[in-house]
Image (cartoon, helix red, strand yellow):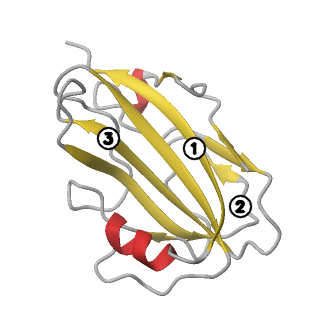
Amino acid sequence: MELSSSAFGHHADIPALNTCDGRDQSPPLAWSGLPAGTKSLALIVDDPDAPDPAAPKITWVHWVLYNLPPDAMGLPAGVSELPPGTREGLNDWKRTGYGGPCPPIGRHRYVHKLYALDTVLPALQPPTKAALERAMHGHVLGHAELVGYYRKQR
């Protein structure tokens, strides 16, 4: 399974356009090589370096999507209409949708994680990353990661 973006490479810098210093729009994402039997996909984007990469204390959640249909081969930049059936979870700003990188200090990692699941998940209450991870347990057929970096412009 592979996850990529035409906006940045694996272990490369995320463009300012996709951050709080720019338009805060989601980057384009593409995936391929889904395992046989994939019935849905889940996407989690988070920052394990919050608040300071020198002394990380929490993992900040930027985006949660689940029940993406397996025939969707990606998401466009600044996605405004999600594929049919897709559900949105809450990020750590307590809202749905993409929240781009906006680190208070230092250069942070932003981990884009795509999961292929053998089921379509029920509506999560509350629709958080933790609830999604619990619901996915025992249903993950494959997993891919794309890591980007960002340091806030001053």
Q: Would residue 144 be found to the left or right of residue 44 on screen?
A: right
Looking at the rendered structure, the kind of residue marked 3 is Pro
Height in image: 15 above or below 101?
above
The answer to whether marks 1 and 3 mark residues whose Cβ atoms lie closer than 8 Å is: no
Residue 101 in the image, given as x and y percentages of width and height: 32, 34
Image coordinates of residue 12 in percent, x first then y, are 52, 20
Q: Which mark is residue 145?
A: 1
The residue to which callout 3 is attached is 48
Question: Along the line of sight, which residue is nearer the eye, 84 or 34?
Answer: 34
Q: Give residue 77's quadrant in the image.
A: top right
- Identity of the residue drawn at 18% across and 28% down: 52
Amino acid tagged 2: Ala
Numbered circles on residues, count: 3
The residue labelled by disc 2 is: 72
Left or right: where 43 falls relative to 134: right
Q: Is residue 68 above or below residue 7?
A: below
The picture places residue 39, in percent across and down from the top left corner, at: 70, 76
Tell which residue pokes out farthest to the top in this image: 154
Q: Residue at x 32, y 46 (%)?
A: 99
Name the amino acid, label 1. Answer: Glu
- Name the residue rendered at 57%, 44% in the picture: 145
Disc 1, SS: strand
